[in-house]
Amino acid sequence: MRKIILIVLLLSLLPCYGLAEYAQTHQDAHAIVEASFNYMREKTSVSTIDMLIYRPDWKRRMRIKAWTKGQDQSIFWIIMPPKDKGNGTLKKNREMWIYNPKVNRVIKLPPSMIPGLDGVGFFQR
């Protein structure tokens, strides 16, 4: 009877040992999420993004074609809605340019304006 109790006790403590081992050898949540983004992105990526933006007074749908190289180089080209079609964004390191086809002009943005552009975080880190 004592052997059975001892075996049950040891088996019940085994998962605790496994959790402690797991916590010591594995990454924190931030590192796991970052690794999953890097896995999807790899060195380069091409994607089409459908984005729904909900605000208290309005909602908006956008479709964007995106090309990325690492985390520092990217091009975003708006495909939809028709009023924004053709707008483009180029990001290289801490520099960013926006192209507007209606005025046929490229505008360079200072680095201080890059976070929170358009109310949407394009650049996740």
Image (spheres, rainbow, N blue to C red):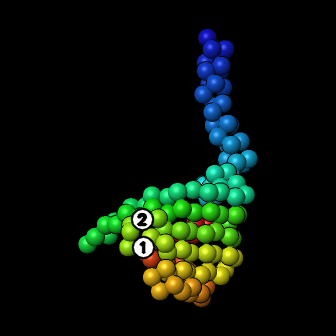
Whether residue 46 appears in this view of the structure is: yes
Pick the front one: 34 or 57: 57
* Residue that label 1 marks: 84
Image coordinates of residue 87 in percent, x first then y, are 49, 75
Pick the front one: 123 or 14: 123
Pick the front one: 4 or 93: 93
Q: Which amino acid does label 2 sit on?
A: Met
Image coordinates of residue 103 in percent, x first then y, are 47, 86
Q: Is residue 39 above or below residue 68?
A: above
Mark 1 and mark 2 in contact? Answer it, CB < 8 Å: yes
Q: In which quarter of the image is the C terminus?
A: bottom right
Residue found at x 48% / y 68%: 78
* Residue that label 2 marks: 80
Badge 2 marks a residue whose secondary structure is strand
Question: Is residue 98 shown left or right of residue 84?
Answer: right
Pick the front one: 31 or 50: 50
Image coordinates of residue 53 in percent, x first then y, are 38, 65
Image coordinates of residue 100 in percent, x first then y, are 49, 81
Q: Quadrant of the N terminus?
A: top right
Residue found at x 56% / y 68%: 76
Which residue sits furthest top? 1
Question: Is residue 26 shown left or right of residue 99?
Answer: right
**Dot 2, how many residues are within 10 Å of its Cα: few (below 14), some (14-19), or many (20+)?**
some
